[in-house]
Amino acid sequence: MSVAFTKEESAETASETLLPDRPISPHPNLVTQSGLQALELQLRQAREAYEAAQQIEDVNERRRQSAVPLRDVRYFVERLRTAQVVPNPASSDTVAFGSTVTFSRADGRVQTYRIVGEDEADPKAGSISFVSPVAKSLIGKAVGDVAGAGNQEIEILSIA
């Protein structure tokens, strides 16, 4: 729409408020039950932020403050629409989506991660995406197996 037909002060102001969509992964949108709940919470928060921004009187400021929440609403609606909840693994014999795996690296570090969906992955909090190189190398393996992770080998110590 041309800026001439809006209450924008300039084309620059209008373009500031049109954010591109967040990229959607080409991988299946697998999530844990807690991951699904996190997506629902993030959608609620984005909607609340959008609604709060709509209360701003100045049209230019309202559009600026609405841009990120509106983009996030579109993203989370799509992620929830395509979410495929994967139940917790029935067995801890082999690594699967939802497993918590403890492994040792060649340099002696021992690490523990839960394998989860892309939106819920947070390595600092102990979770990695099922499409990450480490997770891909671990899935299907058992305790004692050695897997390649980049240019290193890792040995699985436990699966929960």
Image: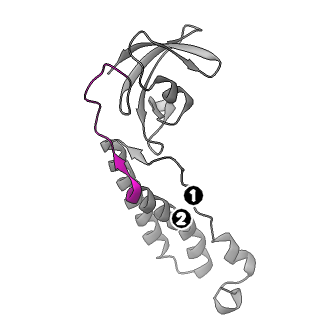
Which quadrant does the N terminus fall into? bottom right
Residue 80 position, x and y percent, is 39, 57
- Magenta residue span: 80-94
Q: Nearer the viewer, residue 104 or 16?
A: 104
Residue 15 position, x and y percent, is 69, 73
Residue 6 position, x and y percent, is 64, 89
Residue type (three-letter) at the residue carrying disc 2: Arg
Query: Taken as a whole, is the magenta stretch helix, strand or loop?
Result: loop
Residue 143 position, x and y percent, is 38, 13
Outermost residue toward the bottom?
5
Which quadrant does the C terminus fall into? top left
Instruction: Look at the image and say whether residue 149 sits in the magenta stretch.
Output: no
| Residue at 57%, 58% in the rendered image | 22
Measured Cα–Cα span from mark 1 to mark 2: 7 Å
Q: Secondary structure at mark 1?
A: loop
Q: Nearer the viewer, residue 12 or 79?
A: 79
Residue beneath disc 2: 71
Task: Decide which of tag 1 and tag 2 comes sooner along the chain.
Answer: 1
| Residue at 45%, 47% in the rendered image | 28
Residue beneath disc 1: 22
Q: Secondary structure at mark 2?
A: helix
Observer-side mark, 1 or 2, equals 1
> Which quarter of the picture shows residue 7?
bottom right
Q: Nearer the viewer, residue 21 or 142?
A: 142
Vertical arrangement, residue 126 with respect to residue 106, above or below: below
Q: Are marks 1 and 2 in contact (CB under 8 Å)?
A: yes
Residue type (three-letter) at the residue carrying disc 1: Arg
Residue 81 relative to residue 8: left or right = left
The 10 Å Cα crowd at callout 2, few under 14, some 14 to 19, many 20 or more, is some
| Residue at 48%, 36% in the rendered image | 129
